[in-house]
Amino acid sequence: MRSSGGAGMRLSIVVPALDEERRLPGSLEAILAFLEPRPHWRPAEILVVDDGSTDATATVADQLRPGTGIELRTLRHRRNRGKGAAVRTGFAASSGARVLLTDADLAAPIEGLEILAAAGADQVAIASRAIDRRMISSRQPAYRDLMGRTFNFVVQCLLLPGIRDTQCGFKLLPGDLARALAACQRLDGFAYDVELLVLARRWGYQVREVAVPWRHVEASRVQPVRHSAQMLRDVLRVAWWRARGRLAAEAPMLGAGTRGSSNAG
């Protein structure tokens, strides 16, 4: 771990990573280059969560040297537990007033943080590929796009009406909400986004979809058939939990603050 930050973090950036030794250095350098000339986001911390990688993911993260007011930490899972588990670990370890979740490949560029932030400090702002498809510079293969649209149709019908893209891995949350979610979320797989948004709405937070630049990046960790089946199963689990009253009705560990009513935005 290399640290040059301090207490009173304005921003935590959580980066789940699995076998990302090739892409991670460039992505972290881009994040550092974004933060260094922007004092309104500092002090800041970057939390790389190595989810049981078999390569040098943790090592390449530890080798980077952040600038003044930026802390870089690497958190490790001994075995691969799933992206949802990695997100929980990062959220729980965060200390920022706001928490940004971003994929290690920066499919949504880090500059999109300013766009998400404009949605409001007390809301959940999620990047959406469905709001303005002109902002997609490189599209997914047609079969993946179709699978994604089908999955989202199911999610809207069962759990999150009005949210058109739950799965884009670029989300900005109030820090206390992120840490409360870490204490309550149970899904370890890729459907963690759905559980996150269901809980946020249940606890009275607005969820705003925001169009940001996005590009498809090859070498995705998603295995379309296998993971789509797992995600559908997990969505049904969340629907069952909600129907049975097994989702937390109130958020633990929240600090004082104003929360709005639910809104798809």
Image (spheres, rainbow, N blue to C red):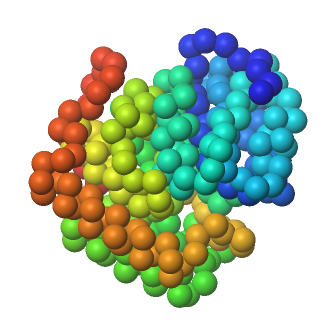
Q: Position of residue 263 (x, y in %)?
A: 25, 49
- Residue 152 visible, this angle: no
| Residue located 66% across and 39% down the image | 76
Q: Nearer the viewer, residue 206 or 61?
A: 61
Q: Position of residue 8 (x, y in %)?
A: 56, 13
**Splitting the image into 4 quarters, where does residue 236 fall?**
bottom left
| Residue located 13% across and 48% down the image | 245
Residue sticking out furthest to the bottom? 143
Q: Nearer the viewer, residue 128 or 78?
A: 78
Residue 160 position (above or below residue 227): above
Residue 12 position (above or below residue 14): above
| Residue located 61% across and 63% down the image | 214
Residue sticking out furthest to the front? 78
Q: Nearer the viewer, residue 49 or 171?
A: 49
Residue 100 position (above or below residue 39): below
Q: Position of residue 138 (x, y in %)?
A: 66, 74
Quadrant in which the N terminus appears: top right
| Residue located 30% across and 17% down the image | 256
Q: In the image, 232: left or right of 112?
A: left
